[in-house]
Amino acid sequence: MLRLLIADGNDRAGRAHRVAIAGRTTADAYAGVVADLMPHAVCVTVNPADADAALPEGAGLGDFDGLILTGSSLRVGDGTPAVRRQLDLMRATFEAGLPSFGSCWGMQVAAVVAGGEAGRNPRGPEYGFARRIVATPEGRAHPLLAGRAPAWDAPAIHLDAVLAAPPGSVVLAENAVLDVQAIAIRYRGGLFQGTQYHPETDLDELAATLGASADDVIAAGLAPDAAAVEAHCAEIAALHAAPEAERRAAAWRLGLGPDVLEARCRRLEIANFLENLSKGTASPRAAATGWRVDRAGNGPSFALAGRHGSEYRSP
């Protein structure tokens, strides 16, 4: 039975906003996907952006088989305490040898910790769907993308992205907008795998999140006004709710195929990550690791015990 730590990338305000527009937090959404894919897995959620964040009493990173870091409305480049605390968590995760997965924000955090660069994508944002993603030669043989077609679309909402992959990483997928759509990062004994797109996001949540980003969509020149964004979001939401007999026509209008419409296809990277974890092929279980709140400082510290005798503290 897998034990997974799901770290919500949003701060308190971001989590409240996400609940208001989509009905649940990003961590809860991921936990729901994990429950569908692997019903016997145990998920524990944590909010590492918060200064008082902590694991359940007596638990450490070494008590988990893997970590998932969700998307977020934060930006790595802002360097706020909420950002630094999450960089610390990812650094501790690498140090502990704990396998990890993340989408969007999660991938950016992992790349920056390992020596890469994340920031505003000079080729523009992706709002709604990342189109024509293709595996790199290395990605075609990588277990994270096992089962992917030669090209696919996926839910995506982002301004920032990984602009420079960290040393020693392997870029697994790309498209015309972004050179790093999926990546595998080995760093300090740990392995992170993730995507810039959102394999965890269902179409109803995508429509809600996209609608809340209407100003950014307009500013990017992708829609003339709020009414156009609203109409597009309504069409996505209608596709989610459409009976089977009507889905084909609705999907045709949006140019979408089974890679987005079918949950088993849309969630493929998460399913592959979990399957490799369950087989024990992702990496060895982490060394015994503790994560505690630094009551005297400005946030959580990630104290590593066992094979790594070091500590990272939020500045």
Image (cartoon, helix red, strand yellow):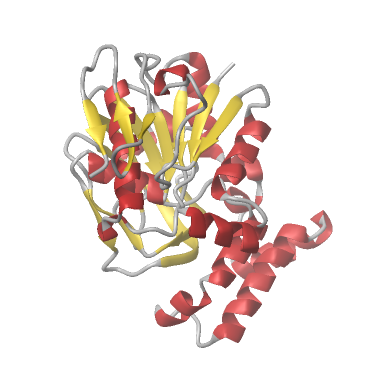
Question: Where's the C terminus, which quadrant?
Answer: top left
Q: Nearer the viewer, residue 62 or 59?
A: 59
Query: Residue at point 61% right, 45% down?
Result: 29
* Residue 172 shows in the view: no
Specify whether 141 is left or right of 26.
Answer: left
Judge whether 270 appears above or below 162 on screen.
above
Image x and y of residue 14, in percent: 50, 58
Q: Nearer the viewer, residue 68 or 134?
A: 68
Query: Residue at point 37% right, 50% down?
Result: 181
Q: Residue furthest front?
A: 296
Snapshot quadrant of residue 62: top left
* Residue 115 shows in the view: yes
Judge whether 77 appears above or below 303 on screen.
below
Snapshot quadrant of residue 42: top right
Specify whether 96 is left or right of 45.
Answer: left
Q: How many marks?
A: 0
Query: Residue at point 66% right, 32% down?
Result: 35
Judge whether 114 appears above or below 23 on screen.
above
Question: Where's the N terminus, which quadrant?
Answer: top right
Image x and y of residue 20, in percent: 64, 62
Snapshot quadrant of residue 243: bottom right
Q: Nearer the viewer, residue 68 or 275?
A: 68
Image x and y of residue 207, in percent: 62, 65
Query: Residue at point 29% right, 47% down?
Result: 84
Q: Nearer the viewer, residue 237 or 47?
A: 47
Image x and y of residue 92, in percent: 30, 30
Specify whether 182 is left or right of 236.
Answer: left
